Structure formats: C-alpha cells, structure tokens
C-alpha cells in the first residue's frame, strides 16, 4: 500500500504553511441563491440535520453533489461547516466534494488543507480526490506544481487513471507546454494507463491552435500506428487546423476518411468547411457541403447561416446573402447578434447604409443588444458614406448604452474628420484620446499623420512622429510612404529622400 507520509510533506512544499480548514468570508456571499433547486436542496439538508439519529453521511453527500452540479460551490462550503457541530462525520466523498468546490473557486490552499484533513482522519485518497487536486492546480495555472504533485504521487505507488493524465495534458496544452506533453506521453508508455483518443485529440487541438498543423498531423499518424481510433472530435479538430492553413484538399480527404470509417461528421465539422470555403470565396463548393450536410440529416444552425451570409457578401452576391438571412426564420433558426452584425457590416461595405440602419433598429425591437462590433461596423459604414454627424451621434448612443468605444472605433471617426475637411476637430479629438490615456496604435497615428500631410503641416507631422516613437509606437511602412508621397507632391525631394533612406535603414523597404 502506498505511503501517505509523503503527502503531508508534499502539501507543505506546494503551499506552505497550511491553515486549518477555514471558509473565506467572500466565498460565502459570492453567488446569488435564486434557483428553486438551491432552496429545495438547502431546505432538505436542514431537515436532515434535525433528524435523530441523523441519516447516513451519503444522504448529505447526495445533496452536496447536486449543489455542485448546479455550481453552488459557496453554499456547499457553508453547509459543510454544519456537519460536525450536528454530529455528522464527513467521509472521503464529502471531503472530495469540498476539495472540488475550493478548486472551482480557485482557493487551492484551502483545497490542500482539506487533503490534510483527509490524511488526519486516516482516509486513503482515491483517484477522484487526486484528480480533483490536479485539475484544480491546472485550472489555476499552477502547471508546474501539478506536474510535481503528479510525480510525487506516482513515485509513492498511487495509481492515477486516464482522467488524471487527460487533465494534465489539457493543462499543459493550454499553457503551451507542448514539449512537456510529449515527455508525459513517453512516461505513460511504461505505465498501466495508456494514452487514449481524448489525450491525443487534446494535443492535436493544441498544435492546430498554434498553427503547427504539420506536427498535429504527425501526432494523428502516431495514434493511428498505435491502434487508437480517432473519433469525430479528432477529425473535426484536425480539419479545422487544415482549413486555417488553407489546406482544403487535405481537409476534404479527412472528411472522406471519416465516411470510410463510418464516423458521422457533426454540425461543427460541416460548419468549419463551409466557413473556410466562404472565406476563400468558393460559394459553389460551400453550397455542395451544405447539401452534403442536409443529406446526412444534420440540420444547419445559426453558425452555418452566418458563414454562408459572410461568404456571399465577400463575393458581392448581396441578394444571396439577404435571401439566406430572411429564410433563416422559415427554417426554424433565429438570427443572433453575430448574424445581424455580419449583415450590417456587409450592407455598409456595399454602401447600403439605410438598410443596415433598418436592421439595427430591428435588433432593438427584438430586444437584441448590439455589441461593439455591430456599432463599429455601422459607424464605419456611416463615415465612409459621408454621414459623419450620424456616426458621431451613434458613437454617443453607444456610450449611453454602456458600451465603451475602443480605439478602432475612434480611429474610424478620426479618419472621417480628417477626410471631411475638419482637421482642427480631428486634432482636438486626437489630443483628447492622448489625454484620456488611450493606447493609440500605429493605425491611429497614421490617420492623423495623413491628415496633417494633406494639409501640408509638415512641422506638425515631424512632432507627431517624434511623439509616436517616444510612446513606443514605431512607424511602419505606411507611415513613411504617407510622408514621402506628401513631400514629393510639394516638391520637397531632398526631405523625401531623407525619409526614404530612414525607411530603408529600418528594414521597411527592400532595395
């Protein structure tokens, strides 16, 4: 039997020193208790407390588990305090539930103090208890401590299961520790626990997310060689990675492989392919995938329609985009905020601002709240179609609705002021952004520099370029090209040549 003495040492080395189990005050009041289930569960718990003799501990555990399932972690911690004063002895299950609650609330120190309590009572931590602690450490970003805990546990002869390793692999992947994941997989080769499809899929997802699709394909090949069959999630993850890299041929090869292996693609699998084809402007192919989807008896969802609408706007097929949007309701799919935003953005780009505004008003009538992207798309459309005052009014309305415009929204307005012959207003607005402490990006500076260049205010341009660099925002190729072109137009050839040399010296222009 494994020794438990090491755990006492381990808990001190991980989080010294451990206090006795205590309930943080903020934890007890961190969630509103409004659900009927919550009230019923607490009432049942309190009734059981009054019974003499009290019911077996597992009855109390069932109530605590149901509260955990509904994410009422503070309530569970509060109820636990009533165990021993009422003559109820918590068992290993009770204490594991408590550990789970502390982990979800990121109180890892308290979770390990419960582990100390488990050992003090002479209980033997099982895989569920240890898995919960590993998951808690990973959840809080304590990946190195999770690995250390794993190594010590294994060294003492404890048997961890696939959930343990799946949790560790997931945590390592989220932290970008792909080398550590590989080492962990190699360690598993000598253990009774073998890598499974979930572990491999997690690694493939991580690699695809970091655009290391080649490595992901190698991992996929490795799992095939080891006789581990990929599932729909494995294929969907890899197809997504290939689509991101523009490798559509390989993505469709995997789709065909799924059919040969009698693995049914999910709505997510088809949506990924439709979206990728739409972004490439291949709407005929996207419609073929949609037909395949329907043939497979998989109902398109709002994500499917959003991808189609976006794709049709991209290839200037506005009528098709509008048709898809208006036909959604007939097919039992309700357009969401993103759907309206795609429509508004697409219509604005096609100078159909009035229709875009009409959809914006429709959102309000449907109690649908536009987000910052919706507002910014509409502001951009109004500005580019010479409705600057309406754009300014919309920006004010946006703030009234509690949505703070970002620097991208403000840059659009700044650009419109400069191009609309209102340079003084633009300068005041730009200064306001600086005073308010907004983190101005190179695009914002370029818009202001372009406005000053058009007005021939080269002294102001030099000052702004100097301030820009002083704030750590380095000019890019557009900055230099804007200044050089403006100087050439004013026959300031020597100054233009000087900027050209600086541009070359900074590596912004290949000679």
Image (cartoon, grey):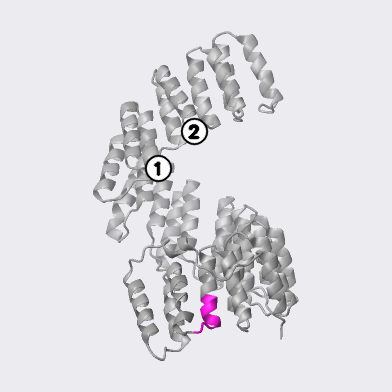
Quarter of the image for residue 498 reads top right
Contact between marks 2 and 1 (CB within 8 A): the answer is no
Q: Residues within 10 Å of mark 1 (few under 14, many from 20)?
A: some
Q: Residues within 10 Å of mark 2 (few under 14, many from 20)?
A: few
Residue 258 lies in the magenta-colored region = no
Q: Position of residue 130 (x, y in %)?
A: 62, 75
Q: Position of residue 228 (x, y in %)?
A: 64, 74
Q: Nearer the viewer, residue 359 or 105?
A: 105
Instruction: In the rendered view, tell whether residue 72 sits above or below residue 45.
Output: above
Q: Residue furthest bottom?
A: 53
Q: Nearer the viewer, residue 9 or 334?
A: 9
Magenta range is 89-97
Q: Is the magenta region chiefly helix, strand or loop?
A: helix
Q: Position of residue 338 (x, y in %)?
A: 38, 49
Q: Which residue matches tag 1?
A: 372
- Asked if one can make out residue 335 in the rendered structure from this viewpoint, the answer is yes
Residue drawn at the location 74% of the way across and 71% of the way down = 187
Residue 26 lies left or right of residue 389; in this view the side is right
Residue 184 lies left or right of residue 60; in this view the side is right
Q: Secondary structure at mark 1?
A: helix
Q: Residue furthest front?
A: 85
Instruction: In the rendered view, tell whether residue 99 sits above or below residue 237.
Output: below
How far apart are the alpha carbons under marks 2 and 1? Answer: 17 Å
Instruction: In the rendered view, tell whether residue 409 sits above or below residue 445.
Output: below
Residue drawn at the location 63% of the way across and 83% of the way down = 124
Q: Residue furthest left?
A: 365
Q: Nearer the viewer, residue 250 or 466?
A: 466
Q: Secondary structure at mark 2?
A: loop
Q: Quadrant of the N terminus?
A: bottom right
Q: Quadrant of the C terminus?
A: top right
Mark number, residue 438: 2
């Amino acid at each position: 039997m494994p020794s438990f003495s090491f755990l006492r040492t381990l808990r001190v080395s991980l989080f010294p020193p451990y206090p006795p189990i205590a309930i943080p005050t903020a934890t007890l009041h961190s969630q509103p208790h409004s659900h009927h289930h919550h009230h019923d569960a607490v009432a049942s718990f309190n009734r059981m407390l009054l019974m003499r003799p009290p019911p077996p501990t597992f009855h109390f555990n069932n109530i605590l588990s149901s509260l955990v399932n509904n994410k009422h972690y503070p309530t569970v911690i509060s109820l636990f305090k009533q165990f021993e004063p009422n003559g109820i002895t918590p068992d290993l299950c009770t204490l594991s539930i408590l550990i789970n609650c502390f982990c979800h609330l990121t109180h890892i120190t308290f979770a390990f103090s419960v582990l100390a309590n488990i050992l003090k009572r002479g209980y033997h931590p099982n895989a569920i208890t240890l898995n919960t602690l590993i998951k808690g450490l990973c959840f809080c970003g304590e990946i190195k401590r999770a690995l250390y805990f794993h190594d010590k546990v294994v060294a003492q002869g404890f048997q961890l299961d696939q959930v343990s390793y799946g949790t560790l692999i997931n945590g390592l992947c989220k932290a970008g520790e792909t080398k550590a994941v590989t080492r962990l997989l190699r360690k598993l080769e000598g253990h009774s626990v073998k890598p499974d499809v979930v572990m491999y899929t997690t690694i493939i997802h991580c690699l695809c997310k970091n655009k290391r699709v080649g490595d992901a394909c190698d991992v996929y090949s490795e799992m095939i060689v080891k006789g581990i069959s990929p599932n729909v999630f494995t294929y969907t993850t890899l197809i997504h990675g290939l689509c991101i890299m523009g490798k559509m041929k390989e993505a469709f090869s995997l789709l065909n492989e799924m059919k040969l292996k009698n693995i049914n693609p999910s709505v997510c699998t088809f949506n990924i392919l439709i979206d990728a084809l739409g972004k490439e402007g291949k709407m005929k192919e996207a419609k073929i995938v949609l037909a395949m989807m329907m043939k497979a008896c998989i109902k398109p969802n709002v994500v499917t329609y959003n991808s189609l609408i976006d794709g049709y706007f991209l290839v200037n097929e506005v009528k098709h985009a509008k048709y898809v949007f208006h036909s959604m309701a007939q097919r039992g799919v309700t357009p969401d905020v993103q759907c309206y935003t795609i429509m508004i953005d697409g219509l604005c780009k096609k100078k159909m601002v009035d229709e875009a505004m009409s959809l914006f008003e429709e959102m309000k009538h449907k109690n649908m709240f536009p987000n910052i992207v919706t507002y910014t798309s509409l502001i951009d459309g109004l500005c580019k179609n010479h409705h600057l005052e309406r754009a300014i009014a919309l920006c004010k309305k946006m703030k009234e609705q509690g949505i703070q415009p970002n620097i991208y929204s403000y840059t659009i307005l700044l650009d419109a002021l400069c191009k609309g012959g209102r340079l003084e207003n633009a300068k005041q607005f730009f200064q306001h952004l600086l005073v308010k402490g907004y983190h101005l990006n190179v695009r914002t500076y370029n818009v202001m520099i372009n406005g000053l260049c058009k007005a021939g205010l080269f002294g102001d341009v030099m000052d702004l370029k100097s301030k820009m660099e002083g704030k750590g925002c380095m000019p890019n190729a557009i900055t230099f090209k804007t200044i050089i072109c403006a100087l050439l137009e004013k026959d300031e050839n020597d100054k233009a040549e000087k900027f050209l040399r600086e541009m070359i010296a900074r590596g912004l222009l290949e000679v």
